[in-house]
Amino acid sequence: MKIEYTNTPRDVVEFDDDVPANLDPTDVVEIFQTPLTGSFNWDYRVQDNRIKKLYELGKQLNWNVEVDVDWTPKFTSISDEEFDFENTQWDNHKTFKAFDKETRLEFFKDLNSWGTSQFLHGEQGALLVASQLASCAPTYNAKLYAASQTFDEARHVEAFNKYLQQRLKRSWPIGRALKGLLDKILTDPRWDLKFIGMQVVIEGLALAAFNAAKNATNDPVYEQMLEYIIRDEARHVTFGINYLTDFVTTLTEEEVLDRAQFALEACTVSRNRLRAYDVWEKYGMDIEYTEAYQKEHIFQTQFQDVLFSRIMPNLKKIGLLHEDLVPEYEKLGVMGFAEGDSDYETSWEELSKPLKSA
């Protein structure tokens, strides 16, 4: 075993079919410190409630990355003959317009692998936070569910990692905005802020992004893999909303405002998760210009709308859409989504559907 301790790597990793899988690797490890306060729960009586029901569903709907996903379809990368270069969100970008077809094609392939890489890194973050919640969540049901979610997240890391290595052949480093948010959640000593940051904000955004990716892909392997992951993530978000809705009612007004400010900060940082700075830099794009360009493009605003249409109703249901912070959400342009349906009243019929095996 070789372990290299380092700061967050910034290199792009290429995967080659000719490299054997049994090489002796060096694990690249970044240390983080956390003043985590764990808790025992000595009351083993299980409450017959929504959390128990979600835990039972998690046991019933386990799936295996190697067995239940059909990895046999050949991966066909997009070619310049198939790709419509005239109808993309980048058509009017000053640097993109100067690219030849080959460069444009590589640019879109890099954006695809960058986005999938962020899914991978986010799921590792979720794995680490879920393992913390198993230690520090105060109630018996929550500990059991957090433990089952930890296994779910490990499976998601395995799935995205395999997809990147075997099909996209390239992995990008974690985006700085996502890394900053994960650091804040992992190192905060308060268990309920971990719930808010992970179960509501990050998992809520991921669920919306996974659905968008599933609808956009032309790869049947990715589509099937995402379908399974989405089923898991829907349970995770429902768990967080149900648990926090009850818990927030026990807090003082000052404590509620503190949690609401944390949620706002997480939402603000999460907007920048969509900015592929590493890809832009590789292709010589001016960062400030590209940020402004992307912010104004209809595709980007529509995608952001999809993401926050899931989070805002959940924050309202929990009681963390504090009136003092409404002007800040209005500045973000997402306040209008607060009147949508939350994940509290979820469709149990939908969550309980059996998996479609490969």
Image (cartoon, rainbow, N blue to C red):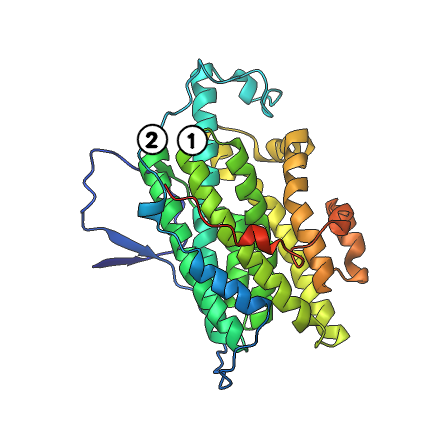
- Dot 1 alpha-carbon crowd within 10 angstroms: few under 14, some 14 to 19, many 20 or more: some
Q: Quadrant of the N terminus?
A: bottom left
Which element is circle 2 on? loop
Q: How many marks are shown on the rendered structure?
A: 2
The quadrant holding residue 314 is bottom right
What's under tag 1, amino acid-wise? Asp
Q: On the rendered structure, is 323 left or right of 20?
A: right
**175 or 43: which is nearer to us?**
43
Across and down, in percent, residue 105 comes to 45, 22
Instruction: Name the residue rendered at 65%, 55% in the picture.
Output: 343
Across and down, in percent, residue 154 comes to 39, 56
In the image, residue 208 sits, relative to residue 74, either above or below, namely: below
Mark 2 and mark 1: span between their CA atoms?
8 Å
Q: On the rendered structure, is 73 left or right of 340?
A: left
Instruction: Name the residue rendered at 77%, 74% in the picture.
Output: 253
**315 or 19: which is nearer to us?**
315
Q: On the rendered structure, is 268 left or right of 108?
A: right
Residue contact between numbered discs 2 and 1, judged by CB atoms under 8 Å: yes
Q: What residue does disc 2 label?
A: 73
What's under tag 2, amino acid-wise? Pro
Which of the two discs, 2 and 1, labels the residue nearer the N terminus? 2
Q: What residue does disc 1 label?
A: 219
Instruction: Name the residue rendered at 48%, 67% in the picture.
Output: 146
In the image, residue 35 sits, relative to residue 224, either above or below, namely: below
